[in-house]
Image: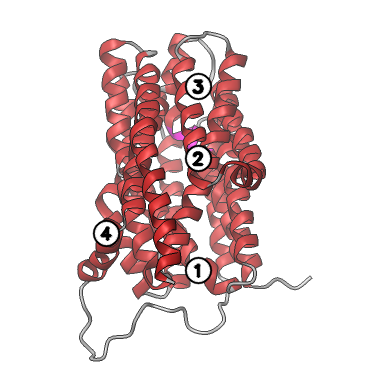
């Protein structure tokens, strides 16, 4: 069977997602191996997502400007080399908190660039006819790798030997890079509108175009802030989940991986059911229902010591989280003009994901001062509260937008 560009992009993304999933379990476990301080453990989680806050404004314009395939290849190669360096430090017992923080930040920055490049390349390799199919495949493989198989493998491998998960990550990311060396796109990758003169506008000026559009459109603006509030709660709960499992419930690293796997299975179920829920409820109502469920089950984690009940809560959190994400992406794409898609996407991700490090640090501080169960209660309250305010406001704005569009036509 001959592989086309879409097959190579899909396979590369699947390999990278598996590596990322292993890392999601291995990095927190390595942090706990180095220190038991909740704030320090949470700082590693924050460093992984800090790139969204620092580089999110410009990354969309950069990906639009440069050769996306070449950028993606170099990014994956950089990630593989960085993981090998971290593996060597662990093997030599030289892994320190500053090293973990630096590695986490660089890995997060590279992951941000890679994800943005993949989203920008998707319509290039399949055009319009196969766009939905490829997006569905990428989402499913991401869920399997990052939420299901990867975390489970990461927990088991770390319990066997701390070096093992990082060797697996290096192999997965290296495989992703190797597949990308075979990727050829039809023609030159579009880099946005060509200037009339050789002088280019700055990345900042180009990024501002996306920001202006997002801020002028109420549905996008409210949706972005709502996503930020939801991610704030998710990050606050997840940052010290490993400590809650190890120190509060007195369970091992493999059990922590099992809990993350529960979320992964729920995510797959959510992806499979999302078309039905949208047909039954509509886009924004589906997002409202999903975020309410996510808030309730997040708070519920603090109310039980049963591992299997927490696994069930994680399943529901994964189901609702993936539903919220997929429908939110579809809603954003249905509103945004194609010419601004990359920049609006990066600005939206900056707002939505920029709250992740703040939530992680806040969750660590709350756990340190008020106990390991408290972040789950506060995170659930934030998620439910934001849904009952920003979620309902987003629905009203979207209804108003839908009413304006027929009149404009």
Location of mark 2 (residue)? 285
Location of mark 1 (residue)? 121
Label 3 residue SS: helix
Percent position of residue 368, x then y: 28, 15
Q: Nearer the viewer, residue 57 or 100?
A: 57
- Give how far apart the Cα atoms at labels 2 and 1 are: 30 Å
Cβ atoms under marks 4 and 2 closer than 8 Å: no
- Give how far apart the Cα atoms at labels 4 and 1 are: 27 Å
Q: Nearer the viewer, residue 126 or 292?
A: 292
Q: Nearer the viewer, mark 2 or mark 1?
A: 2
- Give how far apart the Cα atoms at labels 4 and 3 are: 34 Å
Location of mark 4 (residue)? 216
**Residue at figure coordinates x 33%, y 33% from the top left:** 389
Mark 1 and mark 3 lie on one chain; the one further toward the N terminus is 1
- Give how far apart the Cα atoms at labels 1 and 3 are: 36 Å
User: What residue span does the magenta drawing correspond to?
Assistant: 22-27
Percent position of residue 116, x then y: 42, 60
Mark 4 and mark 2 lie on one chain; the one further toward the N terminus is 4
Label 4: few (<14), some (14–19) or many (≥20) C-alpha neighbours in 10 Å = few
Using residue 263 as the reference point, say whether residue 92 is left or right of it.
Answer: left
Q: Nearer the viewer, mark 1 or mark 3?
A: 3
Asked which quadrant contains residue 233, the reply is top left
**Residue at figure coordinates x 59%, y 38% from the top left:** 267
Location of mark 3 (residue)? 297
């Amino acid at each position: 069977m001959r592989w086309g560009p879409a097959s190579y992009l899909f396979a590369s993304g699947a390999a990278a997602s598996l590596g990322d999933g292993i890392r999601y379990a291995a990095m927190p476990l390595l942090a706990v191996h180095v220190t038991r301080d909740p704030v320090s453990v949470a700082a590693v989680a924050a460093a992984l997502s800090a790139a969204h806050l620092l580089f999110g404004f410009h990354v969309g314009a950069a990906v639009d400007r440069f050769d996306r395939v070449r950028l993606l290849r170099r990014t994956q190669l950089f990630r593989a080399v960085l993981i090998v360096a971290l593996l060597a430090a662990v093997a030599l017992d030289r892994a320190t908190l500053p090293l973990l923080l630096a590695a986490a930040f660089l890995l997060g920055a590279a992951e941000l660039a890679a994800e943005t490049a993949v989203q920008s390349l998707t319509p290039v390799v399949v055009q319009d006819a196969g766009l939905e199919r490829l997006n569905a495949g990428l989402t499913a493989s991401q869920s399997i790798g990052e939420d299901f198989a990867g975390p489970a493998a990461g927990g088991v491998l770390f319990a066997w030997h701390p070096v093992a998960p990082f060797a697996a990550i290096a192999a997965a990311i290296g495989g992703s890079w190797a597949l990308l060396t075979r990727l050829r796109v039809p023609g030159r990758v579009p880099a946005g509108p060509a200037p009339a003169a050789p002088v280019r506008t700055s990345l900042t000026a180009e990024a501002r175009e996306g920001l202006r559009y997002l801020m002028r459109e109420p549905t996008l603006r409210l949706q972005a802030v709502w996503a930020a509030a939801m991610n704030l709660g998710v990050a606050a709960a997840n940052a010290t989940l490993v400590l809650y499992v190890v120190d509060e419930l007195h369970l091992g690293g493999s059990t922590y991986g099992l809990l993350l796997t529960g979320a992964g299975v729920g995510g797959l179920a959510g992806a499979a059911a999302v078309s039905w829920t949208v047909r039954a409820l509509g886009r924004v109502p589906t997002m409202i229902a999903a975020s309410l469920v996510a808030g309730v089950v997040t708070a519920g984690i603090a109310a039980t010591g049963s591992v299997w009940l927490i696994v069930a809560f994680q399943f529901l959190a994964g189901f609702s989280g993936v539903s919220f994400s997929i429908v939110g992406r579809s809603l954003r794409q249905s509103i945004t003009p194609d010419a601004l898609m990359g920049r609006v996407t990066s600005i939206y991700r900056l707002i939505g994901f920029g709250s992740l490090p703040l939530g992680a640090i806040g969750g660590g501080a709350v756990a340190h001062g008020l106990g390991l169960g408290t972040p789950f209660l506060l995170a659930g309250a934030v998620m439910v509260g934001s849904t009952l305010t920003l979620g309902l406001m987003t629905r009203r704005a979207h209804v108003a937008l839908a009413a304006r569009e027929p009149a404009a036509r």
